[in-house]
Image: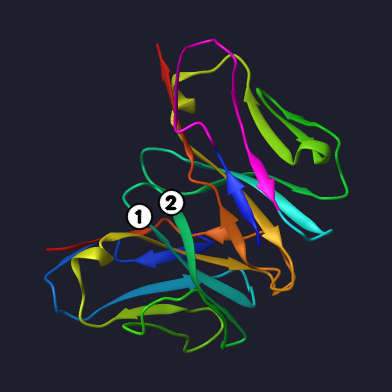
Amino acid sequence: AQKVTQAQTEISVVEKEDVTLDCVYETRDTTYYLFWYKQPPSGELVFLIRRNSFDEQNEISGRYSWNFQKSTSSFNFTITASQVVDSAVYFCALSGGYNNNDMRFGAGTRLTVKP
Amino acid sequence: DTAVSQTPKYLVTQMGNDKSIKCEQNLGHDTMYWYKQDSKKFLKIMFSYNNKELIINETVPNRFSPKSPDKAHLNLHINSLELGDSAVYFCASSRDLYSYEQYFGPGTRLTVT
């Protein structure tokens, strides 16, 4: 069975603060993919990143960075110098297994960045 | 050009009615999906279609029926709507059954009164 846990339901920070969104996953598959999606107030789902289970290198994209650690089954997402436009719900998701398209989403973390 | 589009964006209807939500993708993908996002923002997969074949049906009531006239379209038909069907429904597509990356449509907010 696959499961994604985002323990932080809501996070509120002040602009320019750094913030980390946690994601812990469970899977029995050796090959799997992890994702982060952003859902701004307008409602659409915006793809941010995909990592495969064989690549534990951390990734940085501008103010965004991701820390993938198989030892702790975690795929955490950090926003550096947060901005008001970062306010959104962020979803972590896991895909893999026999039905490779069975994507499981976490419950989401609502991030509010205050000016 | 929008990669994955859904219509309508908003749908308000009464209990007991039958309604459809349309989804189209212009990415040339073989696999399409429907997800339901409830009021708590939790996203759950409902169906996926690969080359017009149903692959997953996650214990969704049979009032929900996906219909795919061709591989670029996967419409969602709902019979006898219930209050609990109120949610945001997302369509998505991926290159094929073995591609892990899914592209999402903008969502359809369904409200059943």
Q: Position of residue A77 (x, y in %)?
A: 65, 31
Residue at the image position 83 percent from the left and 38 percent from the top: A71
- How many numbered tags mark residues here? 2
The residue marked by circle 2 belongs to what chain? B
The amino acid type found where label 1 is placed reads Asp
Residue at the image position 55 percent from the left and 11 percent from the top: A17
Q: Please indicate whether residue A114 sits to the left or right of residue B79 in the image.
A: right
Q: Position of residue B21 (x, y in %)?
A: 33, 73
Q: How is the image coloured?
A: rainbow
Q: Within the image, what quadrant is residue A10 found in? A: top left
Q: Please indicate whether residue A33 sits to the left or right of residue B50 in the image.
A: right
Say if the magenta span includes residue B92. Answer: no
Neighbour tally class for label 1: few under 14, some 14-19, many 20 plus, Cα within 10 Å: some
Q: Within the image, what quadrant is residue B77 found in? A: bottom left
The residue marked by circle 1 belongs to what chain? B
Residue at the image position 21 percent from the left and 75 percent from the top: B81
Neighbour tally class for label 2: few under 14, some 14-19, many 20 plus, Cα within 10 Å: some
Q: Which range of residues does the magenta coloring cover?
A: A7-26
The residue where tag 1 is placed is B38
Question: Of the numbered discs in the image, which one, if any, rests on residue B42?
Answer: 2
| Camera sees residue A34 | yes
In this view, B110 is above or below A64: below
- Whether the residues at callouts 2 and 1 have beta carbons within 8 Å, the answer is yes
Say if the magenta span includes residue A22. Answer: yes
